[in-house]
Image (cartoon, rainbow, N blue to C red):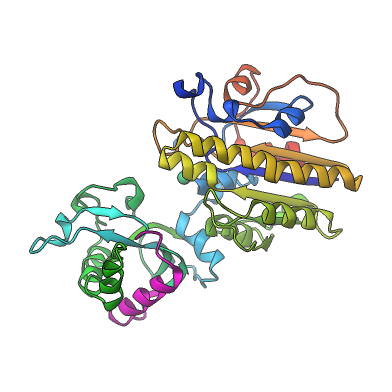
Amino acid sequence: MKYVIILGDGMADEPIEKLDGKTPLAYANTPTMDFLADMSEVGLAQTIPNGMKPGSDTANLSVLGYNPEVYYSGRSPLEALSIGVPMGADDIALRCNIVTVSEEDNIPYSERTIIDHSSDEISTEDAAILIDAIKPVFENEIFKFYVGTSYRHCLIWKGGEVQDITPPHDILGKVIGDYLPKQDVLRQMMEKSYDILNNHPLNLARAAEGKRKANSIWLWGAGTKPHLDDFTAKTGKIGTMISAVDLLKGIAVGAKMNVVNVEGANGGLHTNYEGKANAAVKALLNDNNDFVYIHVEAPDEMGHQGSIENKVQSIEWLDSRIIKPVYEALKASGQDFRMLILPDHPTPIRLRTHTADPVPYMLFDSTKTDKTNNIYNEVYAQKTGILIKEGHKLIDKLLF
Ligand SMILES: [Zn+2]
């Protein structure tokens, strides 16, 4: 038996008037999901435990079978695993975004406004130059920077303390003063980074080209070294992760799963769907692999952007360019298989951020093809009355 999870990040939503009162998932043209749902179990799963923050970190841990209440130790440490940062027991990892803040003359740093959490999706190459510029000033035996991808980097703070700091993407357009870290050392580092970066030659060149300056760091997402149980020891299955996102790759590294990097997979709407599907099929047809987790970020990004049309498009492409080829290849291989399709959390267009509501799941088993007459969407899933309250146990239905 082979096992697949196909996860549309942030795919769940609310009924939207412009979509004839349907959710994007219900509205989208998804012939493969419709065909499979008709033979599948459909229900709801609570992937975010009560009182925890809805994010891809907590939610994907749940979906992979790790109770976030036990295993979650912060977002940045999971990303740190993915980029190969060595973490000690008393180390704190922080996400270090390279951001754009406003540059009015003669105002204190705290009165600046945050304009872009990604500095126009800065290239990794440019970001590395700027990280290199701040390193000599801030690095010592306690602080060390590591370059990640695009605007997403990592700071390790030896013997540091974890405090909650607001993610920059949640306060776009706001004056930063109220959201800066309470810890003096981190706040001062951010403030000083502006002095170093705002007139850095690379930023002057960016400004001349009409790009946003990448003129400050923003530290957040602090946490300690994660300790995930070995996925294979836990389940008896050998697993592979396919994702464009460091967070998901880091979870897989922590769980000692295989990680496949797909060229051109970027977390956006125009990602390499075919490349991901091919990589998944290759891993699934390998005798030394039982399970594949395919993560597609696009529906979440479209939810954050508030684009109804693109969210529907991302779901249609998930169906036609991932689910369909993976299903067809497994069917053609003659092997038995189960497929679990779901989002990690909702990212409703109306709110442009995550919620903790339960998500609809659909579980197909190639050995049970009697009609269930089920439909796969949020409203229908709720009507089934099936609710997996401990989301981290949903994977047991897939694997056992
Ligand atoms: Zn998101």
Res 347 seen here: yes
Residue farthest right in this picture: 334
Relative to 71, residue 45 above or below: above
Location of residue 370 in the rendering, given as x and y in whole percent from the top left corner: 86, 23
| Residue at figure coordinates x 18%, y 56% from the top left | 112
| Residue at figure coordinates x 24%, y 63% from the top left | 187
Q: Quadrant of residue 363?
A: top right
- Quadrant containing the C terminus is top right
Residue farthest front in this picture: 209
- Quadrant containing the N terminus is top right
Relative to 113, residue 137 above or below: below
Res 50 seen here: no
Q: Is residue 314 left or right of residue 319?
A: left
Q: Is residue 356 left or right of residue 5?
A: left
Which residues are drawn in magenta? 119-145
Q: Total of numbered circles in the picture?
A: 0
Location of residue 175 in the rendering, given as x and y in whole percent from the top left corner: 19, 50
Residue farthest left in this picture: 106
Location of residue 95 in the rendering, given as x and y in whole percent from the top left corner: 40, 61
Q: Quadrant of residue 360?
A: top right
| Residue at figure coordinates x 62%, y 62% from the top left | 253
| Residue at figure coordinates x 42%, y 66% from the top left | 153
Q: Is residue 136 magenta?
A: yes
Q: Quadrant of residue 318?
A: top right
Relative to 186, residue 6 above or below: above
Relative to 378, residue 52 above or below: below
Q: Is residue 325 magenta?
A: no
Location of residue 340 in the rendering, given as x and y in whole percent from the top left corner: 71, 38
